[in-house]
Image (cartoon, grey):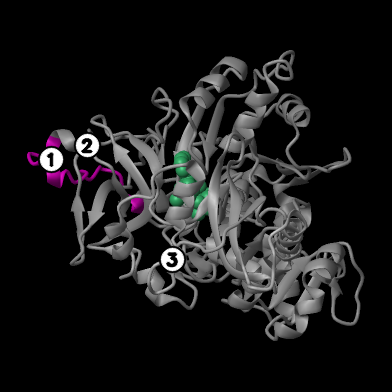
Amino acid sequence: MDKTTINHSPSPGALASDPKVAEPVRTEFSWAAARAELDGLPGGGLNIAWEAVDRQVRAGRGEATALRWLGKTGERREFSYAELARLSDRFANGLERLGVGRGDRVCALIGRVPDLYITALGTLKAGAVFCPLFSAFGPEPVRVRLARSRARVLVTTTLLYERKVRAQRAGLPDLAHVLLADGEDGADVRAFQGLLDAEPDDRAPPRTTAEDWALLHFTSGTTGLPKGAIHVHDAVTAHRLTGRSILDLRPGDVFWCTADPGWVTGVSYGIIAPLTNGATLVVDEAEFDVRRWYAILERERVNVWYTAPTAIRLLMKAGPEPARGHDLSALRLAASVGEPLHAEGVLWGEEHLGQPFHDTWWQTETGAIMIANDPGHPVRPGSMGQPLPGIEAAIVRRRPEGGVEFLASDEEGELALRVGWPSMFRGYLDDEERYRACFADGWYLSGDLARRDADGYFWFVGRSDDVIKTAGHLIGPFEVESVLLEHPAVAEAGMIGKPDDYAGQIVKAFVALKPDYVASDALRKELIGFARTRLGPAVAPRELEFMTDLPKTRSGKILRRLLRARELGLPPGDLSTVEGEET
Ligand code: WT7
């Protein structure tokens, strides 16, 4: 029997005598067994890229298609596992020649093109740390992440380099090499292709250990600059296992993950999980388009599809007509992640695609799926599903004096996971304090509010902090507010998520002007334009409202909760709570 078969524990609440201490029960599952299913490196150690490509070549699947790339303008390119192994070897050799190796950060700021996948895999083989940057970020989020990661290498394109990096290069002293996927060697840049061409396409196996750093993913909190969540090579244990048990990936499957590798889903499930399971990864370079997406599902005979509620809502909005007439009979499983997936979305999938969407829950910090509607059980529409084998989840309340208290079924609280799964982040880069603040009593506290029903299914309630999700992207208020504050007219700025039928939430800013400035439509447009230029369209406010004063605590902290209440037309709430936020 396959060791990865789902084996859910019984409902935790049913076994505990006192519902207040309904701690989940351990299952028979063991991570050691999951780890033993991996190849491992000759002579010991573990490497994500080795498991993703070389392992498949060694298992005789070298000629199978690893990557099927669909270009914006109709081009198609296929890469076999053997080719991807060779190309990533070359890139690893090139990095080594540049003196880049263990622990060094290699950032990628590039769209969904084959060079991105070669970069990710080659970086991992070289023992360096792969750090993706979303290509729709503006110059400011790019600068902050390059500086905070102390990136030594950046792989990008001429256009993205010129628009977002070149003018800031002097402020990035660690950035020794910029490699252009479409460029030539120049004064301060090199051709990516030239680097590959100069290298032999074989290489000794990597020398990484399971606990060596592998991936750095930036994510946002309520306060301060983005946090760099560090993941190690052992994360592949969870990527492979969840790809198999939750996404049902088997060798030869055609798998399409629509997430951009600029975010964690696009790396964990857009690269690692499908390749370690021997699937063919479909990569579409283009942005969302209803007709294009149906055509891809049909023409590529996609077996497993992993997408997000924003896309599902846009498909629903387009109605059943564009779906009609497409042969989607190859589709065996559809899954969703990143935002709340309402029951209507699940059922719509069933009716119009022939498959219900299986909701899954996880975070940048968890590295892999933690809670899911798994393929072995009927979907519970509207619920995120149940914790995976090997994962213990609970609903807790943080005690003011420290530690956590476990809540009973149907009570709302913070979603917590007992520490110890392989893809758990190992730190926030250079921020031990914020890392520590995520844990209490051996539990990781997710910052999400949720509840668990009597059958052990988890239901999303909201966030306990001020980050928002817009079109599936996590945005922190600090980055948006600090850019607005750089404009000479702005005295105070506050950002919230305004509910939106399609994007889930949109970024809305509230601004108080300095004394010499007068609110006007022209100034509003100017501020939105200013923010777009600096932050990029994915992060900049869509809406901006002027206020004479922003609500603040006595110490001057902006009360975004009151801005949200104002936006939704709700009563501002109990002022004593507001004072409580001071501390
Ligand atoms: C946050 C994490 C999802 C992995 C990639 C994004 C929200 C995630 C769900 C879901 C409702 C969800 C949570 C979480 N989220 N999955 N199924 N239902 N909300 O990782 O950018 O770190 O975002 O996304 O709020 O904390 P991320």
| Residue 398 vertical placement versus 17 (above, below) | below
Label 2, label 1: how many angstroms apart (C-alpha)? 8 Å
Residue, x 48% and y 78% (percent of image)? 430
Whether disc 3's CB lies below 8 Å from ligand 1 is answered: no
Q: Quick check: is 30 in the magenta stretch? A: yes
State the image coordinates of residue 406 (x, y, percent, origin top left): 19, 49
Q: In which quarter of the image is residue 530?
A: bottom right
Q: In which quarter of the image is residue 332?
A: top right
Q: Mainly helix, strand or loop, the magenta region?
A: loop
From the viewer's perspective, is the residue at label 2 or at label 3 nearer?
3
Residue, x 61% and y 40% (percent of image)? 503
Q: In this view, does 339 lie to the left or right of 295?
A: left
Specify few, some or many for label 1: CA neighbours under 10 Å numbering under 14, 14-19, or 20 or more: some
Q: Residue 552 carries which label?
A: 3
The image quadrant where one finds the N terminus is top left
Disc 2 and disc 1 in contact, CB within 8 angstroms: yes
Span of residues in magenta: 15-32
Label 3, label 1: how many angstroms apart (C-alpha)? 39 Å
Amino acid under disc 2: Ser
Q: Mark 2 points at which residue?
A: 409
State the image coordinates of residue 429 (x, y, percent, origin top left): 50, 74
Residue in the foreground of this view, choosing between 382 and 158? 382
Q: Name the residue under label 1.
A: 19
| Residue 15 vertical placement versus 512 (above, below) | above
Amino acid under disc 3: Lys
